[in-house]
Amino acid sequence: MEHLSSFARYVERLGIYAADAPTHEDYGPQYPPVANPEQVSHWEHALYQALYARGLKPRVQHPVEQYTLDFGLFDGNRKLNIEVDGERYHREWDGELARRDVIRNQRLIELGWDVMRFWVYQVRDELDQCLDRIQTWAESSHG
């Protein structure tokens, strides 16, 4: 059992969870194959391709605890969750972000993530502004 205790201390000292560890795999300019393609919207494909064209290479369908992030973008110790939200699943009748998404955002923030959510219509109609916001995050992490 001592070897398990020793390993646990080693992992604790690393201060990083395996699921949060970025990979340097380059998926290429097209949205990569995923386990549940039916859960990926056309707008997620479009945002991925636009991010890639700007030199940003997010992980797609990235697992964090019980959640699957649309995108995880890593830069050093910083982590950005990018979500593309459709109104059917993410907007309440009063126009507010669904409660489950608010809870999810809070949990990710507790885990050290920054979170950006974009409505589908923003990706469709204001893609450059969405990309600028993400790129600003990436560039500010170097400072």
Image (cartoon, rainbow, N blue to C red):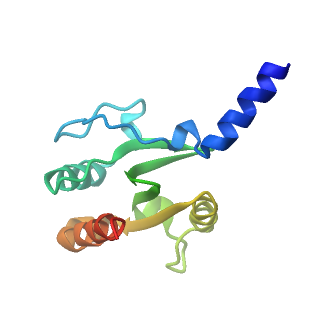
Please determine whether, in this image, residue 142 is positioned above or below residue 34: below
The residue lying at 55 percent from left, 72 percent from top is: 92
Total numbered labels: 0
Q: Quadrant of residue 122?
A: bottom left
Please determine whether, in this image, residue 62 is positioned above or below residue 90: above
Direction from residue 74 to residue 114 in the image, left or right: right
Could you tell me residue 84's position as x and y percent? 37, 59
> In the displayed image of the protein, which residue is found farthest to the bottom?
94
The one nearer the camera, 95 or 105, is: 105
Please determine whether, in this image, residue 19 is positioned above or below residue 80: above
The residue lying at 31 percent from left, 63 percent from top is: 138
Which part of the image, by quadrant, shows the C terminus? bottom left
Direction from residue 33 to residue 74 in the image, left or right: right
Could you tell me residue 142's position as x and y percent? 33, 65
User: Can you see residue 62?
Assistant: yes
The one nearer the camera, 15 or 22, is: 15
Could you tell me residue 5's position as x and y percent? 80, 28
Direction from residue 122 to residue 101 in the image, left or right: right
Q: Quadrant of residue 7?
A: top right
Could you tell me residue 9's position as x and y percent? 74, 36
User: Can you see residue 40?
Assistant: no
Which part of the image, by quadrant, shows the N terminus? top right
> In the displayed image of the protein, which residue is found farthest to the left?
53
The residue lying at 42 percent from left, 66 percent from top is: 117
The residue lying at 53 percent from left, 39 percent from top is: 19
